[in-house]
Amino acid sequence: MMTALSLEDVAEAPELLVLASLDATLMAMRVAVIAAFPELLRERGKEREPPLLAAARRLTDRAWLLEHAMRRYREELDYARPRHSIDDLPF
C-alpha cells in the first residue's frame, strides 16, 4: 500500500490519486469476499468448486494481479522521476 500523497506527488503524477483509491477499494473488496468465503484462505482442493466460490477465487486472484501491476507502475514512475540534487535546495 502507498504512503500519503503530497501535493507535489499529485502535481507530477495525478494518476497516483486513482491508484490510491484503488488500493483502498481492492483491500475492502478482498476483506468482504474472504469474509463471505473463508474457504478462500485454504488451498484449493481437487474437487470442483461451486460456481460462486470459483468466481470469488477468480476475483481475488485478479485483484492480486492488478495490485502487482499497480505496484510495478509506481516503481517505474518513481524511477522515471527526476532526482533532486542537494544543489537544488533553496538555502
Image (cartoon, rainbow, N blue to C red):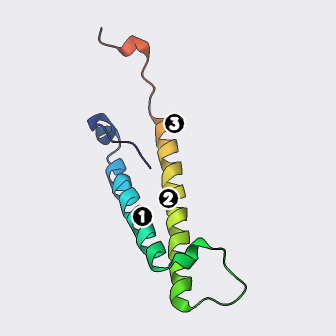
Question: Gap between marks 1 and 3, in whole Å?
Answer: 25 Å
Q: Nearer the viewer, residue 34 or 64?
A: 34
Q: Residues within 10 Å of mark 3 (few under 14, many from 20)?
A: few
Nearest to N terminus: mark 1 or mark 3:
1
Q: Nearer the viewer, residue 50 or 66?
A: 50
Write down the quadrant of residue 50 in the picture: bottom right
Residue that appears at 37% across and 15% down: 88
Q: Give, as a three-letter code, the residue at label 2.
A: Glu
Q: Give, as a three-letter code, the residue at label 3.
A: Tyr
Q: Residues within 10 Å of mark 2 (few under 14, many from 20)?
A: some
Give the position of the C terminus as an image quadrant: top left
Discs 2, 3 touching: Cβ within 8 Å: no
Discs 1, 2 touching: Cβ within 8 Å: yes
Q: Please say if 85 is above or below 51.
A: above
Which marked residue is nearer to the observer: mark 2 or mark 3? 2
Nearest to N terminus: mark 1 or mark 2:
1
Residue that appears at 26% across and 37% down: 7
Q: Return the residue at label 3.
A: 79
Dot 2 falls on a residue whose secondary structure is helix
Q: Return the residue at label 1.
A: 26
